[in-house]
Image (tube, rainbow, N blue to C red):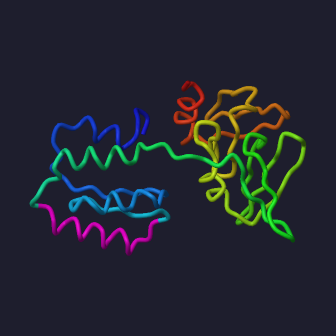
Amino acid sequence: MPDGNAFDLLEKLHSISFKIIFTTAYEQYALNAIKIDDADYLLKPLSIKEVIVAVDRMKSKLSASIPKEDLYQLLSTFKIPRTYNPYIPIPTSNGFELIQTKDILKCEANESYTTIYMIQNVKKTISKKLGDIEMLLAPNLFFRVHHSYIINKSYLKNYVRGEGGSVILLDGSEIPVSKRKKSEFIEWLTEG
């Protein structure tokens, strides 16, 4: 959303006369959503069957409204900042290698694999999807500019305007920014 997120929108409302189904990739919020009887929670990726069941469940509760205090309590739990580990474990033949997230220049998707490019001109390919890696990285430092790329703000040299535009990293690589991510990316780039 160009002017904030769903939680910002809900906070601006004076009364809530509708039901809410939260959809997120963060499992830790499920318990809080379940505590509010008039809200539901779906974990991404979504299945059609889960969405239909959740909508049917909410239809059966349409006569009541969510007490504003319960909604504010739930919204505040979504704003609890996550803590991010400064290391990512990379599986090796005899265990794990821990790489420091601050040394990651960019991550690139390749089907069900991800290649992690480090600032020391080292790259590691692991059998995890880019979305799994994205969950491990602090969103104030890392941004998924394209369905195939995550970049580290610390190593961003230039943003080149265009339809979506592109970014140039300190190693000289140019990464496309998808059109649909452009406004969110610019907002992320310019925030403190």
The residue closer to the viewer here, 172 or 33, is 33
In reply to whether residue 48 is colored magenta, the answer given is yes
Left or right: residue 122 compared with residue 135: right
Q: Residue at x 62, y 41 (%)?
A: 143
Side of 44 relative to 171 (left or right)? left
Q: Residue at x 81, y 31 (%)?
A: 170
Residue farthest toward the right in the current orientation of the protein? 121
Q: In the shown orientation, is residue 20 left or right of residue 79?
A: left
**114 left or right of 36?**
right
Identify whether 172 is placed above or below 110: above
Q: Which of these two is toward me, 145 or 156?
A: 156
Q: Which residues are magenta?
A: 46-62
Which sits in the foreground, 18 or 41? 41
Give the prevailing secondary structure in the magenta stretch.
Answer: helix
Q: The C terminus lies in which quarter of the figure? A: top right
Q: Is residue 115 magenta?
A: no
